[in-house]
Image (spheres, coloured by chain):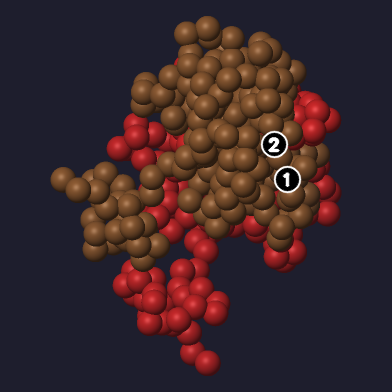
Chain colours: A red, B brown
């Protein structure tokens, strides 16, 4: 006996999502059948709407339903700083601190020769164009603290610095509230390197 | 800054699924936006189709797109045995062994006074009706080996045995290929109780 086609297809759809294997997909599919009709309809609508209405901002590459995005259109934001991130999600995390008042730029990935990802696969050309046109005086590179993130930051610094624009990198060190005992060597090394007088 | 509404709604929808918190939902939502249009359309369709086309079999309670379900309609299956399970998924697992030739009955849950689940919340009335009409001579109770599963099995046995129908329970013991060293006490106790001469 096979699952009825309708559920088999739904299981297949769930399995296409990242991190969801056949057991989880089956559980989700059975759960879906028990959801009320309105909720399933809403789920289907939100899938289609997200795919239809959301695009990347033509200036910064952030995800948005209007172009340019909210941040690029905001005249109150500082035009002189651009903070470069890997993914739109990173912008959300940074905005939560309510502290940074400059603009953003989303690379949509990092340099990764192993995966065949070179500079031309990232949103770098658009960044250079922005720098040529505007009066940006600092580019803050906030790629992740992974080897690829570091390499991408170095690449950008070499590209941008000759134009006389300051390139900075977020500080690495111990997370607030973390224990030294459990920190990895790389983090400790960075924390020592970046020590400050008190 | 907030997420654009279209993605916020999609994140909400994903968060309604079991075992998916806000971080996973966000990851899935961003993944969805990067999926190709056809795949998203297929996903939405399969959600709606599953909800629309799938029902529970009016005889056994299994999930099906035709009523009665494939197994209930199959004249080659033994009418004298009914195997009682908690969920439709369990039928799929049992069918994979290609060994059992009788019918099934799905309870859609177990007795659980803590969750306010009594006999009237389970698909038990339909089971009794089936037993009265047909010539079933054995009911095999295959509820899970949890306290609730056990209690449900005992309840069914007390209900059905007076009608002169044999009620059996699946054997409990060591899983094939498992190590005694890692078995829990309850499993070991059942394995000793159920020991057989070789």
Where is A111 relative to B33, above or below? Answer: below
Q: Chain of mark 2?
A: B
Judged from the image, the secondary structure of the residue bearing numbered disc 1 is helix
Residues B180 and B197: in front is B197
Looking at the rendered structure, which numbered label has been put on residue B119? 1
B68 vs B9, nearest the viewer: B68
Which residue is rendered at x = 37% and y = 21% of the image?
Answer: B98
The residue positioned farthest toward the bottom in the image shown:
A198
Q: Nearer the viewer, residue B124 or A30?
A: B124
Q: Residues within 10 Å of mark 1 (few under 14, many from 20)?
A: some
Q: As drawn, is B152 to the left or to the right of B49?
A: left
Percent position (x, y) of residue A2? 49, 17
Judging from the image, mark 1 belongs to the subunit labelled: B
Q: Is residue A139 visible?
A: no
Residue B13 is situated, as x and y percent measured from the top left of the image, at 73, 39
To the question of a shared chain for discs 1 and 2, the answer is: yes
User: Based on the displayed image, in which of its 4 quarters is residue A48 positioned?
Assistant: top right
Residue B115 position, x and y percent, is: 72, 56
**Residues under numbered marks 1 and 2 in contact, where contact means CB atoms less than 8 Å apart:** yes
Alpha-carbon span between mark 1 and mark 2: 7 Å
Q: Which residue is mark 2?
A: B124
- Residue at disc 2, secondary structure: helix
Other residues around mark 2 within 10 Å, as few (<14) / some (14–19) / many (≥20): some
> Against A98, is A59 above or below?
above
């Amino acid at each position: 006996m096979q699952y009825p086609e309708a559920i088999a297809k739904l299981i297949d759809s769930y399995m296409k999502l990242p991190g969801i294997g056949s057991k989880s997909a089956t559980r989700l599919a059975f759960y879906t059948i028990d959801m009320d009709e309105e909720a399933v309809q809403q789920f289907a609508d939100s899938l289609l709407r997200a795919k239809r209405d959301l695009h990347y901002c033509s200036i910064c590459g952030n995800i948005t339903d209007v172009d340019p995005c909210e941040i690029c259109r905001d005249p109150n934001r500082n035009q002189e700083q651009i903070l470069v991130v890997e993914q739109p999600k990173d912008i959300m995390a940074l905005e939560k601190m309510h502290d940074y008042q400059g603009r953003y730029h989303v690379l949509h990935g990092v340099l990764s020769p192993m995966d065949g990802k070179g500079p031309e696969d990232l949103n770098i050309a658009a960044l250079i164009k922005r720098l040529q046109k505007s009066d940006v005086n600092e580019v803050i590179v906030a790629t992740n603290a992974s080897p690829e993130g570091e390499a991408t930051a170095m690449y950008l610094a070499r590209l941008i610095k000759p134009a006389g624009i300051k390139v900075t990198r977020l500080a690495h060190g111990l997370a607030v509230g973390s224990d030294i005992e459990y920190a990895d060597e790389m983090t400790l090394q960075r924390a020592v390197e970046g020590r400050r007088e008190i």
